[in-house]
Image (cartoon, rainbow, N blue to C red):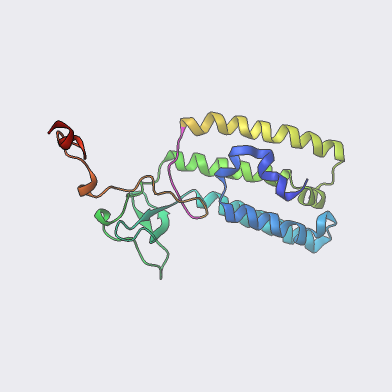
C-alpha cells in the first residue's frame, strides 16, 4: 500500500497522530526497509524507526500550547503537568503569567492517557498498513494485505469512535494543528449586560 494512502484509509482517526511523526515514518520507511527487501541491518533500522515514532505519538499527547494575548504569533509549547500549566524544555522561553496567555492548559488527567494509548494503536495500524514495513518483518500475500486494509481501519475506527467521545481532549500540542478558537477576548471587546449594540442607539433615537 502506498504511504500516501495511509491517512485516507484510516480516515479521521489519523488526526490523533502528530503530523510530523506520520510524515517522518512515511518518508523514512521505504528507505530504511529497502522497500521491503530487508537485510538484517534494515530490520534493526526499521524497528528503531517504528519505536521512535511510537514513542513520539505517545508522549506528544501530553503536550499542549498557549498563545500570548499581546502577540498572536508567539505560541508556547510544553508538557502538561499534574498541577496544570506547561513545563518547557530547558533553554526555551517559558510561557508568561496566566493573564497574558489565551488559555492555561489543564492538568494532566486520565483522558490524556486514553488518548496516548489510542495514538499508539492508530500508529500501529499505520505500520500494519505500510507494505514496506510488513514485508520487512513478516512478508504476507497480496490477499492478506487487502484483508488488513479493509479490517484494520474499521476496527481502529470503531474503537476510537467509542472512546474519544467518552474522553474528549482539547489539547493542541507539539505536532498537532494549533487553534486560536480558545483565545480570550480583551475586556474592551466583551459587551456589557444591557449595553446597546452598535447601531441600536441610532435606531432607537
Q: Is residue 104 above or below residue 148?
A: below
Which residue is located at x 58 percent, y 56 percent?
20
Q: Is residue 171 magenta?
A: yes
Q: Is residue 177 magenta?
A: no
Q: Quadrant of residue 99?
A: bottom left
Q: Quadrant of the C terminus?
A: top left
Please, what is the dominant secondary structure of the magenta stretch? Answer: loop
Q: Quadrant of the N terminus?
A: top right
- Residue 144 in the figure: left or right of residue 192: right
Which residue is located at x 67 percent, y 58 percent?
49
Q: Is residue 203 above or below residue 28?
A: above
Looking at the picture, how far across and down is residue 131, in whole percent?
Answer: 79, 48
Looking at the picture, how far across and down is residue 199, in whole percent?
Answer: 21, 38
Which residue is located at x 37 percent, y 67 percent?
93
Looking at the picture, how far across and down is residue 55, in whole percent?
Answer: 58, 53
- Residue 67 in the figure: left or right of residue 10: left
Q: Which sits in the foreground, 75 or 107?
A: 75
Q: Quadrant of residue 5?
A: top right
- Residue 115 in the figure: left or right of residue 140: left
Segment tinted magenta in the rendering = 167-174
Looking at the picture, how far across and down is residue 190, in whole percent?
Answer: 22, 43
Amino acid at each position: 500500500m502506498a504511504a500516501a494512502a495511509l491517512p485516507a484509509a484510516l480516515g479521521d482517526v489519523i488526526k490523533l497522530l502528530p503530523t510530523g511523526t506520520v510524515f517522518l515514518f512515511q518518508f523514512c520507511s521505504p528507505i530504511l526497509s529497502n522497500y521491503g527487501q530487508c537485510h538484517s541491518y534494515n530490520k534493526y533500522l526499521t524497528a528503531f524507526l517504528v519505536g521512535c515514532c511510537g514513542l513520539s505519538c505517545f508522549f506528544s499527547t501530553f503536550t499542549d500550547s498557549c498563545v500570548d494575548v499581546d502577540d498572536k504569533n508567539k505560541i508556547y509549547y510544553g508538557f502538561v503537568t499534574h498541577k496544570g500549566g506547561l513545563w518547557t524544555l530547558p533553554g526555551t522561553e517559558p510561557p508568561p503569567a496566566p493573564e497574558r496567555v489565551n488559555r492555561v492548559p489543564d492538568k494532566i488527567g486520565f483522558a490524556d492517557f486514553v488518548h496516548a494509548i489510542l495514538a499508539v494503536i492508530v500508529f500501529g495500524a499505520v505500520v500494519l498498513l505500510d507494505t514496506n514495513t510488513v514485508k520487512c518483518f513478516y512478508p504476507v500475500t497480496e490477499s492478506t494485505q487487502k484483508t488488513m486494509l479493509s479490517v484494520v481501519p474499521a476496527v481502529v475506527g470503531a474503537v476510537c469512535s467509542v472512546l474519544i467521545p467518552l474522553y474528549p481532549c482539547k489539547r493542541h500540542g507539539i505536532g498537532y494543528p494549533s487553534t486560536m478558537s480558545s483565545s480570550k477576548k480583551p475586556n474592551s471587546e466583551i459587551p456589557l449586560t444591557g449595553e446597546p449594540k452598535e447601531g441600536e442607539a441610532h435606531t432607537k433615537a
